[in-house]
Every structure is written in structure tokens, then in C-alpha cells.
Image (cartoon, rainbow, N blue to C red):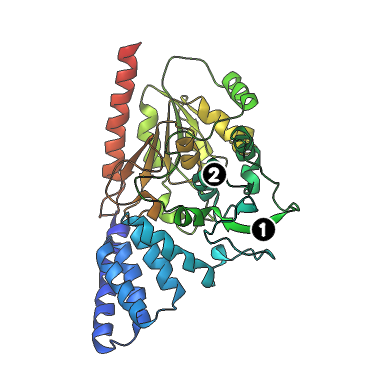
Amino acid sequence: MQNRASSRTEMLNVLRLYDQFLIDYPERFVAYHNRAELLKQLGLYELALRDTEHCLSHLPNFAMAWCNKAFLLNALGRYQEGWQCYEWRWKTDVATFQDPGWPIPRWQGEDIGQNKLLIYAEQGLGDNIQFVRYALEAKRRGMNVVVVNHSPLENLLNYNLELHGVPYAANNSAIGGLTCYVSMMSLPHYFATTLDNIPYPNAYLQAQPTFIEKWKSALPSGEKLKIGVVWQGSDKHLRNHQRSLNFSHFQPLFSLPAEFHCLQKTISPDDVERSQRYPNLHLWSQHIDDFSDTAGLIEQMDLAISVDTSVAHLAAAMGKPTWILLSYHPDFRWLLQREDSPWYHSVRLFRQSGDYQWTYILDKLYRALVQKIQQREQTQ
């Protein structure tokens, strides 16, 4: 607790230094961009947006400032402006934003008739899961598309694309007859997405029947509520220290009369050892080969509780009741303050407060889970 409180105090001290620096050097416009990032971390989004816009008024070709503006606008729910600004990411030197550089034009929303458009997955696995819905939307609009997903998701997502009649191709395979290409994460802009017209906010993915049967037979039978849990994301994620929790944070949940099933593919040896104290907590990491297995396991759950990871996206995209724990400064897709999500109607968001502590929000989640278990028992 002291470390988190110190972190906020340190950020406020740095903010005072920025304030004084910009008083002394008001023409160092990049400093406004840097201060905006700090203001965003502190939850002061409108002030951050003001600094970003001031920076851009003097440095109109500063691509990272445009990206920062996109993050701020999207977090504030101003999607039509935000997704347009996000197209500046191709002009940055950020590795995750690099254009794949196919020798055909990048699609920019123009009418291409029935010419073939390649839609490819960009950035992380959660992004792929969230934005593959736009491939379904493109097909619904009558466009001639072919989709390429990230390799760990191909088995699951290509199965679902086939259900919707959407052509796909294997990652790194040769694809003929293409006219142009576009990232899934550019389609919210070109399809004029707002908070009110996000496509497929209900279940748009389902587990494959063979994996449903596999996991149905693997799980212990019983009448108790089955709850999938994820307390840790990938340590390769840049914001993993902000989004992930320790096993100890989830321990109070495991004292409740429910069956808990860990949905993580990777579990630390220490957490494996700690889990042995809880006979109602089941670990399946050694039996999960890819996301088809994860989806089959999720299908058996009554509820998923997760930090902000790709598994949370998958459970939500399957329409499973999903409770997601968010840090005070969340990813822009979760917006601000609200407990629901226009992207996934089955989601409930539990947000960390400005003290950067998890204690209060985990207590709130615990009480909500007690109530859900009691309601389940009353209906049996």
C-alpha cells in the first residue's frame, strides 16, 4: 500500500516539475505531450487532452501526440474523433504499430466494390479477439474479404469465421487476388463507430463442439457455481504490472462455496503451490494447448472473473458473464467510470480507485460474488 501511495506522490511531484519547466520554457512543446501522459496516469484526462492539443497546435506532424490524443478521446468515448486520430500510429516508430508493408495499397475506406480486401490482426491477442467482429461486419456489409488472425487464435477464430461465411487464410500463407489491406483496428474508424453502433456487442464467438465435449468430460460434476479465474496476464505486456494481481488478492474468493477453475495457460510455480491449499480451485494449464481449449473450458463456466487479459476478451466475446478488474488508469477501450461496456454486453467492470489500491474493489467483487452464489442456491 505504501509503495502505491508513494507512486502517486512521486507522480504529483513530477507534475510540479513539469509545471515549473513549462513556465520557464513555454516553447518546449514536446513537454506538453509528456505532461499529458503523466496527467493521464493520474486520471486527469481532460487536462491531458488540453496539453496534447496544445502540443499539436505547434507540432502538427508529431505522430505520437496524435496517438496519445486518440487514446484520450477513445477513453472519453469520443470515438469518431479518436479512431481517426489513431490512424497516425502508422507514422510512429513504435514496434507494435508498424505497417506490415504488403505490396498493395492500404485501404482507407473507399468503395472497392467486390475487389478483395485483406483484414489482418494487429497488436495483441485481446485486440484480435475484440476487433475480429469487424470482419463479420465487413461480410455483413457485402464486402469481399479474407481474414488473417494471430497464430495462437487461428484454430478458434477461423472456425468462427467459417460459421459466418467469412473467408480466412493461415498466418504467413500466400494469398492471391488481393486489392488492398487493412488492420482490424482501423475498421472502427472506417465504419464510423460510435458508442451506439458497435457491431456484435453480444456473443459473436463460440467454442468448437469437440472442445466443449472435451472439457465437459474433464470437469468434476456438481451443482456449485463454476467460476473461471485469471489473476495474472502475460509478463511480456508493457502494462502487466498495472493490470495483474497477486494470487493473494484472489485467495478470499476461494473460501466461498463455489468451484473455481483457473483459465490461465501460464501459472507460476509459487502459485501452483499456493493453490494446493484450496481443494475447490482447479488448475488446467497443462491441459490447455491453445485458445480452442480455453474457449471449451470457458463454455463450462457460469462466470469468468479476470484481470484485463485476452482471456477476459474471449469470455466476453462468447457472451459469458464476465467480471473484469481494471486498474485506475485502464486501457482506453474500457472508457471511464462506467461499470458496463458497449463492446461486450455481458461484462461488468470493477474499477480500481484513485488510491491505486485493489483492496476496496476486491471487497466489492467478493460481496457481489457472495450474492451471486446465494441467488444460485436459492434457485436450486
For the point 61% across and 32% down, which residue is it? 163
Between 31 and 370, the residue placed more toward the observer is 31
Q: Position of residue 229 (x, y in %)?
A: 45, 35
Amino acid type, residue under disc 2 in the picture = Ser
Q: Residue at x 55, y 21 (%)?
A: 219
Image position, residue 28 (x, y; %) = 34, 86
Residue 179: numbered disc: 1
Q: Residues within 10 Å of mark 2 (few under 14, many from 20)?
A: few
Tell me if residue 156 can be seen. Answer: yes
**Identity of the residue drawn at 58% across and 47% down:** 143
Could one spot residue 331 in this view of the protein? no
Q: Residue 346 in the image: x percent, y percent?
A: 39, 34
288 on left or right of 353: right
| Residue furthest top as drawn | 380
Question: Where the C terminus falls, by quadrant?
Answer: top left
Is 200 on the left or on the right of 146, as rendered? left
Disc ID at residue 268: 2
- Determine crowd level at label 1: few under 14, some 14-19, many 20+ residues with C-alpha closer than 10 A: some
Looking at the picture, which amino acid does disc 1 mark? Thr
